[in-house]
Structure formats: structure tokens, C-alpha cells
Image (cartoon, rainbow, N blue to C red):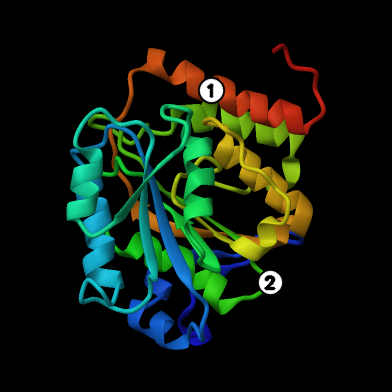
Amino acid sequence: MAARQVRQDLGVGQGPVFHHRAFDAAALARRRRGVTVSVCIPARDEEGTVGDVAGRVHVALTARGGGVDLVDELVVVDDGSTDATAARAEAAGAVVVPSGSPGGGKGLAMRAGLAATTGDVVVFLDADVTDFGPHFVVGLVGPLLGDPSLVLVKAFYERPLHAGRGGGRVTELVARPAIGLLFPELSHIRQPLAGETALRRSALGSLELEPGYGVELGLLVDMAEAHGAGAVAQVDLGVRAHRNRPLAELRPHATDVLRAALSRAGAAIAS
């Protein structure tokens, strides 16, 4: 597997970068040597896309779905949906579990996903992706199966916005500036808020996920602090499209991200 990996070292203390094409699902399945893999998809009112995301994982990457035996558990965490999200996910082959705190936020849904699964490697996927492919999972799992020193893999990609390539507004206007000022050792991370991420469960230890939208930044900073920035890898997934929200709806996301960054930097934050 190592001979096929395309990687670029980013300097001392910075983890490697891979392309998803460096990994083959069948090869990973043969070489995982008992390492179990769980896929967790937090979802709230995503009936239009969750079935496709879960279904492609089920069919392509689970033995139960007739695909490559790479994924052992496929779970959708329903965060209080009022539409057919749960039904679409179940029909697509996923096990659906409640978040336990309906509408409580992405971080709480991810906590529920961790509690509902047992995999040594846990892959988190967003439910609103409109161009999802199994290579998302393969690319995220590959580095962790190939290098025991890695504990976290963050995706990066091009993000279309309407007719252009301007997606990732909270990332560029809040997350990356905050990281550059407060955690410069992580400035090389291209998509710190990527919902597509994979982690080694044993590396979490006593770390607790942020309850809201700051969960991705909090997880990145916490894992890097516990294990070093060099233990965080990145994988290029190509292009990722999803439902872009109006600017006014992004303020809660930005607030949660900023809160997660400032709290980890020791700043006093208003309750």
C-alpha cells in the first residue's frame, strides 16, 4: 500500500497530505488486519441527500450491502428530524439512532454516534452532500490504516458556491484566521471545519466533543495538542458540493467556531 500513496510532507511538525486516489478499497479491506471501521453520519432534516450518502457507503463498502468489506458499522444519527431523514437512511442500509438531544447541535449528534458505534476507526460524514462517492470514506480511512502514528484525518476539497468556487465562508472568514492567530502550528490545515473526518478512537482518550458547530475545530485543536500536529493528516477528496446556506444563517456556525477557538486559547467568553 505504501508504494501507491501520494504524499507531500509539509514541514517539521506538520502531518502528511494524501490524495484519495492513493487508496484502493479492496486493498484496504484485505490489509486492515482486524481493525474495525465505523461510519457515522449526523443528520437533521436531510431527507433529500442522506439516503444517497448512506446508500453508497452500504452498497460499495459493506459486506452486508454486497460491496467491499471495509466498513463494519454504518450509523445515521437523527438529530430530531421532522422529515423523512430516518426512513430514507434506514432504507439505504444504515442503522438509525437518535441523538438523545433533538436539535442539540452537530457536536452532540457526533457524541451520540461515537457512543452508538464500536469501530477502532470512526469516519464522520456530512449528510447534505450532493455529489458523494465512496472515495470519501476510502480516502479518509486509508492514512489511518497505513500509518499507526496518525490519529486524525481531515478532508479538503474544492467547494462550489452557486456558479463559482467560493464555498467555505465560515472557514475562510473565521476558522482559518482564528487558527492562524491562536494555533499557528495548524495553519497548514486547508479545511479545519470539514465534516468529512476520520479518527482513531483510542486517541480520543478523555477528550469530549464540542456540543455545537465548533466541534470540528475543537476536535482538531484538541487532537493536535494531545498527539502533535504531525499526527494529523489531510486527504484531497476533489470537489464537494452541498446545500449552501444564506449568509445570515451562518452566524450561529461562526459564533460556535469562534467560541471553540477562544476557549481553547484561554480567553474569557461571555455566557
Give left or right: position of 210 versus 55.
right
Question: In the image, residue 125 lies at what x, y percent?
Answer: 40, 50
Helix, strand or loop under label 1: helix
Q: Earlier in the sequence, mark 1 or mark 2?
A: 2
Q: Is residue 178 visible?
A: yes
Give left or right: position of 267 versus 211.
right
Answer whether labels 1 and 2 touch (C-beta < 8 Å). Answer: no
Mark number, residue 93: none
Residue occupying image coordinates x 57% and y 25%: 256
* Cα distance in 3D space between marks 1 and 2: 32 Å
Mark number, residue 149: 2
Residue occupying image coordinates x 23% and y 52%: 90
Which image quadrant for residue 128? Answer: top left
Question: In the image, residue 11 lies at what x, y percent?
Answer: 71, 61
Closest to the observer: 59 or 195?
A: 59
Q: Amino acid at mark 1?
A: Ala
Helix, strand or loop under label 2: loop
Residue occupying image coordinates x 72% and y 57%: 205
Quick one: label 2, few (<14), some, or many (20+) residues within 10 Å?
some
Q: Is residue 20 visible?
A: no
Q: Is residue 259 above or below residue 27?
A: above
Residue occupying image coordinates x 69% and y 52%: 223
Q: Amino acid at mark 2?
A: Ser
Question: In the image, residue 65 lies at what x, y percent?
Answer: 22, 71
Give left or right: position of 48 versus 203.
left
Quadrant location of the C terminus in the rendered image: top right
Number of on-image labels: 2
Give left or right: position of 67 versus 222.
left
Mark number, residue 254: 1
Quick one: label 1, few (<14), some, or many (20+) residues within 10 Å?
some
